[in-house]
Amino acid sequence: MRFLHCSDVHITEDYLALPWRKLGWRRWLALAELSVGGRARAYRQARRTLATLAADTRALGADHFILSGDLTAYALEAEFQGARSALGSLAADPRRCTVIPGNHDVYTPGSQRTGRFARHFGHLMESDLPEHRREGPYPFVRLVGEGAAVVGLCSARVPPAPGIAAGYVGKAQLEGLAAVVADPRLARRALLVAVHHAPRTAQGAPDHRLHGLRDADALLGLLRGPRFAVLHGHIHQRYHLPATADRPHLFGAGSSTEAGHEGGWLIEVSGGAVVGGQRHAPRL
């Protein structure tokens, strides 16, 4: 069984062409990142690249596509529309696609208050085991075949200001995840847990407090050994830390549409465990 894992696709608009009142002060401050920082140039082809990755799901024989957040650059309606369009028919089928929000998808209080992410992707967060939900739709469970399940968590919180990008899962979702792990109906399945923020960096260390997952230790403490994998984004580096007796596999998908770094992970599941992964780069 195969899963294609991507993240941080950052569908981007032409912000200079939009009314400044519509952008709001948070996005005004972010314009420096777009121009001087080079983000606009790096993600100019993001829609085309995401569409290619979505098409690769079938071409690679992958059973399920997982996108672990940051579909947008700054949570504008047109960016969500662009992401939904790029995913095409894949995003219409919860059996084949799981999407969770990242911090850029709740970039402003208004985007969170109006449920902008859920309006476009809420149908992908329906759960096959709804009794384990604790915070809105989370955690949700998607049964895939006979040997795996995808679990969706939300660590994305509206940042108090640009530059502060930490997140947390929270006690309620962690309690729900513990119930998922203990559910006897899932005992013979590998569990692939999608969360946006990275529990560990590529070096195996916690991320810094203004950027990292604040309850990473509590999350990892529930998921021990090769039956489990945490699939995340947020850190724009692609890496895999193999499972140990005390830790799950950790797959960081990098930034899957960034120019020069396109791609994700093709993750293999067999016998109710995650047995490895290989990097996948789309042909553009």
Image (cartoon, rainbow, N blue to C red):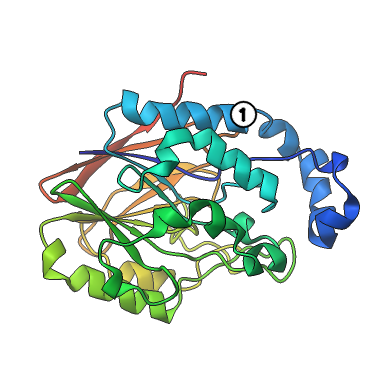
The residue carrying mark 1 is 259
Residue that extends furthest to the right in the rendered view of this protein: 20
Who's the residue at 10% across and 57% down the image?
A: 188
Name of the residue lying farthest toward the top: 283
Q: Is mark 1 on a helix, strand or loop?
A: loop
Q: Nearer the viewer, residue 100 or 253?
A: 100
- Residue at image position (67%, 60%) is 107
Q: Where is residue 237 in the image (x, y as percent from the top left)?
A: 51, 43
Q: Which of 111 and 67 is in front in this view?
A: 111
Q: In this view, does 201 lie above or below 266?
A: below
Q: Nearer the viewer, residue 81 or 103?
A: 81
Name which quarter of the figure residue 150 lies in. Answer: bottom left
Q: Nearer the viewer, residue 243 or 99?
A: 99
Q: In this view, does 227 lie to the left or right of 25?
A: left
Instruction: Please state the horizontal and vertical placement of residue 62, each as a whole percent of the image.
Output: 29, 33
Identify which amino acid the numbered label 1 is placed on: Ala
- Whether 107 is drawn above or below 4: the answer is below
Q: Where is residue 161 in the image (x, y as percent from the top left)?
A: 74, 67
Residue at (41%, 37%) from the top-left corner? 90
Horizontal side of residue 120 vs 183, given as left or right? right
